[in-house]
Image (cartoon, rainbow, N blue to C red):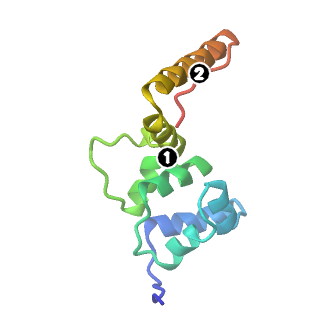
Amino acid sequence: MEEQTNNTTALTKWLIDYTEIHSISLTALAHAAGLSSGTLRSLINHPERIPTIETCIRLSLATDKLPEDIVSMAGVPTPQHLVLEQLHPERGELLRIYDQLSSSLRVILVEIARAIQLVQIESGMEMTTET
């Protein structure tokens, strides 16, 4: 069993402050971010662990923090060319699904996406680049 450390990092301090300010448990915050219930507690108990970029982005989506702020607090090494806003977890899932489709099904999927986009435009729904 790993020994718990008492060091804090910018991320662990922010997580503790966030949960206190918003009266939310680490477990509830983890669930809101789509993470397993022990993920955030593990980061608090073992601050030497560096979360994945996906964890940081999911945490960002569930809070008021920008992904780059969380990545920076966590000390996650990222290539300079990486655009964090393009790493929404659902975008990755969509790409994996797309890659598994045959060529003809890919064409159909793109046509469906374009039709959805057209309906969105015609109905006056705001288009979003939110990630």
73 and 126: which is toward the camera: 126
Verify CB contact (< 8 Å) between mark 1 and mark 2: no
Q: Quadrant of residue 83?
A: top left
Residue 113 in the image, given as x and y percentages of width and height: 56, 22
Which quadrant holds residue 2? bottom left
What number of labels is visible? 2
Residue 59: % across, % down: 55, 54
Say whether residue 24 is left or right of residue 16.
right
Q: Is residue 23 left or right of residue 37?
A: right
Classify 7 as above or below 76. Answer: below
- Residue 125 occupies which quadrant of the picture? top right
Decide if residue 109 is in sight here.
yes
Q: Determine if residue 63 is in view.
A: no
Q: Amino acid at mark 2?
A: Met
Residue with the mark numbered 2:
127
Give percent across and percent down for residue 51. Answer: 44, 64
Q: Nearer the viewer, residue 20 or 86?
A: 86
Q: Secondary structure at mark 1?
A: loop
Which residue, given by chain and number where applicable, does mark 1 sit on?
66
Q: Residue extending furthest right? A: 23
Q: Which amino acid lies under the numbered mark 1 shown in the image of this protein?
A: Leu
Query: Dot 1: few (<14), some (14–19), or many (≥20) neighbours within 10 Å?
Result: some
Within 10 Å of disc 2 (Cα), the crowding (few <14, some 14-19, many 20+) is: few
Q: Residue at x 58, y 20 (%)?
A: 112
Circle 2 SS class? loop
- Seen at 47% across and 23% down, the residue is 104
Label 1 vs 2, first from the N-terminus: 1
| Distance between the alpha carbons at the discs numbered 1 and 2 | 20 Å
Please, is residue 53 above or below residue 128 in the view?
Answer: below
Residue mark closest to the camera, 1 vs 2: 2
Badge number at residue 83: none
Q: Residue at x 57, y 26 (%)?
A: 128
